[in-house]
Amino acid sequence: MTALAHQFFTEPSPVTDCAVSVRNVGKVYAGVVTALENINVDFPRGQLTSLLGPSGCGKTTLLKIIAGLLPATSGEVLVNDLPVAGPGPERAFVFQDFALMPWANVLRNVAFGLEMRGIAKSEREEIARSHIAQVGLAGFEARYPHELSGGMRQRVGLARALAVNADVLLMDEPFSAVDEQIRRKFQEDLLTLIAREKRTFIFVTHSIEEAVYVSDRIVLLSARPGRIAQIIEPAIERGGDPDAIRRHPAYLDTVDAIWQSLKTYLE
Amino acid sequence: MIVFGHRIPMTGSLLLWALLWEIVGQLKLTILLPPLSRVVLRAFEIVPTETFLSAFAVTASAFVAGNLIAILVGVPLGILMGSSVVADRIFLPWVNLFLSAPLTALVPVIMVLFGLGQTTIILTVVLFAIWIIVLDTRAGVRSISPSLIEMAASFGAGRWQTFRKIYVWAALPEILAGIRLGVIRSVKGVIIGQLLVSIVGFGALFKLYGSRFLMEHFWAVLIVLFALAFALAEAFAWLERRVEFYAATRG
Ligand SMILES: Nc1ncnc2c1ncn2[C@@H]1O[C@H](COP(=O)(O)OP(=O)(O)OP(=O)(O)O)[C@@H](O)[C@H]1O
Ligand SMILES: [Mg+2]
């Protein structure tokens, strides 16, 4: 890592208020594949933290353990200081492949989480409508997933996660199945969303640029078995013009430094 | 079908066979085969009669009841097998065995257990219909994208909710295909059951006509039954095509 880069991102500051805390978590699949080993990391409340690392390093595994969809082999996860035993209303998941119900229209898909919570039909549809409008899909409520583009489908997935009003949003490579132009637009929208919503985001990505662009904090994982290699806080001002960020020297240098660091894991 | 460069529709070959039947019948070669025209006239005569209608009613009720039971038991069982490895191990060998077994041989066993009545007929229908429903439902459930199940779990859906809101809908194309095949098989089931019991519905009619050599009556009822079974299968095929877009769009 170059001395120059060090000016532009800092080593992590201690987390005072953490929404999610992962303690000594390990995961062994089927008794043989060690996917994660001794993971200790805190996710600060109201910020976006990315999990970044080479393919197969266990990013999805860690996110699903936090979601309560997978049991950890060892260690524990605390959400709002309470140990996780399964999925809970304070967390919502955004899926890489959208996971929309093809037989249900946009409105029903977005309202699904509320439906599972037993909220009355008229109320949940009203909430769903406002979130559909928020992600820019007003007018598409009666459409079916197969009538939408990939980008629109992921907006539906996002609206569904937002509709349940969870503190923590878990996103597994949410933009990887949409094309590059839409992806950039999504990243900008995500920054607007974070500024507005004040929720905790945990965001898995393959892309270094994406991680640096959207994250307050980046957790770098090493290749299998996944361990925490480094935690980085890009020192980037996010208030202004979104395009300015991509030209900012801190952005470019952080991307480069992470690349140098990850390169050591590729052969 | 193409004959001498001319396109002959399927009904053409059907007409040809009908003509052949008529000719053979008119030649009076055997008492077993009366001319088709007389059989058709007889059919119009028989269908409105009290005897036919009550036989039809009793058959239809056994048919509907048996299929309902087969669906209500078969679909949940198929979903259970598709979603649980343990259940699959326990039930799959039996389902496969019964699917290919000569079920007619089992009907006398049901007769011994449940007597010569409507119960036996209904159970025969279930026996014929259920296995293909189970297997098709299981196949449908196994093709559900795992992330849809995770999605439901992540929003706190319980087992019963996941069953009602995800499994049934996601596997609907396969479930309907299974029900259609089950219905076709159970036409066989209901007639075989009635023939063996032979004091209920069409079974009793066939026995009566057969023993008195009323061949026109015999063939008339048979043709009506064939037509009904065919219409039923077509109706289900039509219904299935209407939900085909599920299969095309999920994944
Ligand atoms: N159900 C499973 N059974 C056995 N091994 C698994 C299972 N799921 C994942 N693995 C293995 O665990 C490791 C981590 O998988 P995971 O999907 O978490 O990686 P990832 O970082 O999300 O990868 P990608 O970037 O490709 O999405 C991989 O080597 C994978 O092969
Ligand atoms: Mg992954």
Image (cartoon, rainbow, N blue to C red):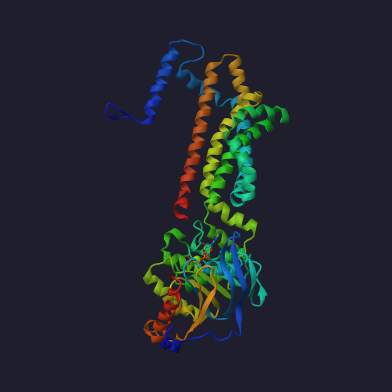
- Please name whichever residue, B233 or B178, is drawn nearer the observer in this view of the structure: B178
Q: Quadrant of residue B205?
A: top right
Viewed as shown, does residue A4 lie left or right of A130?
A: left
| Residue lying farthest to the left in this orientation | B5
Viewed as shown, does residue B133 lie left or right of A261?
A: right
- Please name whichever residue, B138 or A83, is drawn nearer the observer in this view of the structure: A83
Rendered position, A202 above or below B30:
below
Q: Is residue A126 visible to the viewer in this orientation of the structure?
A: no
| Residue lying farthest to the front in this orientation | A267
Q: Position of residue B132 (x, y in %)?
A: 56, 40
Q: Position of residue A247 (x, y in %)?
A: 36, 83
- Please name whichever residue, A232 or A260, is drawn nearer the observer in this view of the structure: A260
How many numbered discs, if any? 0
Q: Position of residue A14 (x, y in %)?
A: 58, 86
Q: Residue at x 60, y 46 (%)?
A: B78
Q: Residue at x 60, y 69 (%)?
A: A26
Q: Residue at x 60, y 36 (%)?
A: B97
- Please name whichever residue, A246 or B107, is drawn nearer the observer in this view of the structure: A246
Q: Quadrant of residue B214?
A: top right
Q: Is residue A75 visible to the viewer in this orientation of the structure?
A: yes
Viewed as shown, does residue B156 lie left or right of A233?
A: right
| Residue lying farthest to the bottom in this orientation | A7
Q: Quadrant of the N terminus of chain B?
A: top left
Q: Position of residue A235 (x, y in %)?
A: 46, 86
